[in-house]
Image (cartoon, helix red, strand yellow):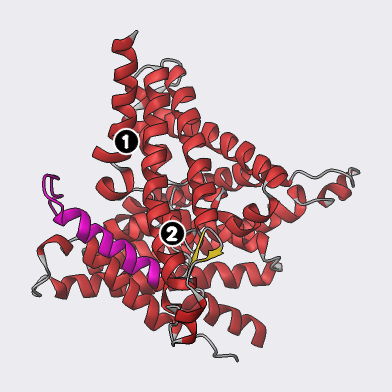
Amino acid sequence: MTQERTNYIDIVIKGIWRENPVAYQVLGICSSLAVTVRMSTAIVMGIALTVVTAFSSMLISSLRKMIPSNIRIIAELAIVASLVIATDQILKAFLYDISKQLSIFVGLIITNCIVMGRAEAFALANKPLDSFFDGIGNGLGYTLVLVIVALIREFLGSGKFLGFNIIPQFALDAGYQNMGLMVLAPGAFFVIGLLVWLKNSLPGISKEER
Amino acid sequence: MGDLISLFINSVFIGNILLAYFLGMCSFIAVSKNIETATGLGFAVIFVLAVTSPVNWVIYHGLLAPGALAWAGFPDFDLSFLTFITFIAVIAAIVQAIEMVIDKYLPLLYTTLGVFLPLIAVNCAILGTALFMVERNYTFMESIVYGTGSGTGWMLAIVSMAAIRNKIKYSDVPKGLQGFGITMIIAGLMAMTFMMFSGITL
């Protein structure tokens, strides 16, 4: 039992840190940029993706012996799309404001490379529970990157943290200005680019060869 | 007519599907190493978008939107929760159909576009355009123009990125920034230049 539990923890940590899908495999950055103007949207988006990845991996893995391999992409897409519809309906019911701000990006989880990537790379060859935890790990890894980018953009762009002002009034009086660039699209590109630079400069991490 | 031209300009430059909404990034990063393949993929995306947007419009407004089934005698039905799965199925089916038609009748075009078509089915730019079209309540004509415009904007972005990456091979980029990092920074600079077009109204 303890053996199994450490195994699951290991799978989760691998997704979050050692093989982080956004930072190491450059997957799923589409939405990781668009929803990062605010922390709140980034967190909700991260959770939504984690749930979808975890359950789609589990379902696909438990059906892996029944799906013929030549139509597996369609079968996987159908499973993922159904889960995304369920997630979208739940968000609309309980977090209407945030679901409005996320607009089409919840729907775009269907085409997010992380979900399909984990299904193809892990779920098709592993047991359902392992796949479930693999999905959670990768989803959380994605959330981590999302939240870091959102933290930087929200702080520099509008001087807020989770919606609260944290730039003191005297700093504004003294001439401090928010960096408007961070709220716009280019800011996201710069932050991701610089984060990748930072990641590649950290010691002890294998460099990607390009 | 002026509205349509203005919508086209807007979808190519200010609301560029790639640089302002970050859609289609995966293939943008992966295929922007060579100008010729980037151009091929760009044309394929324009083509698929110009076809799928109006088809999705017809399906959404004829079957899925709240009250859309009134013609069949079910005015109370609201099938809009099926939007995602229908759109992705329509896109996959159309891409497959286009691939077969091109393969049969235009073998020359197939050799250049063929390899990219399967990639496009899961390109988020296609699904994103369809969903934006629904969210912004475009009319049928607007959906055609918007689809073509987004495709053109995407192609413009990927071809210029391929051209820049071709030149950057000769530059002295810091070690940790090489590859993905510098691509992102360039994309950021490109996004800034594309945003200069905002404020232009026709």
* A46 vs B25, nearest the viewer: A46
Of tags 2 and 1, which is closer to the observer?
2
Label disc, if present, on residue A15 of the rendered structure: 1
- Residue with the mark numbered 2: A150
Q: Is residue B24 visible?
A: no
Residue A123 vertical placement versus B191 (above, below): above
Dot 2, how many residues are within 10 Å of its Cα: few (below 14), some (14-19), or many (20+)?
many
In the rendered image, which quarter is residue B201 located in?
bottom right
Q: On the rendered structure, is B50 left or right of B156?
A: right
Q: Which residues are magenta?
A: A187-210
Q: Please, which residue is most extreme toward the top here?
A: A1
Task: Tell me if residue B29 is in the magenta stretch.
Answer: no
Write the residue at 53% across / 44% down.
B93
Q: On the rendered structure, is B159 left or right of B136?
A: left
Q: Position of residue B39 (x, y in %)?
A: 31, 68
Write the residue at 12% across / 51% down.
A209
Dot 1, how many residues are within 10 Å of its Cα: few (below 14), some (14-19), or many (20+)?
many
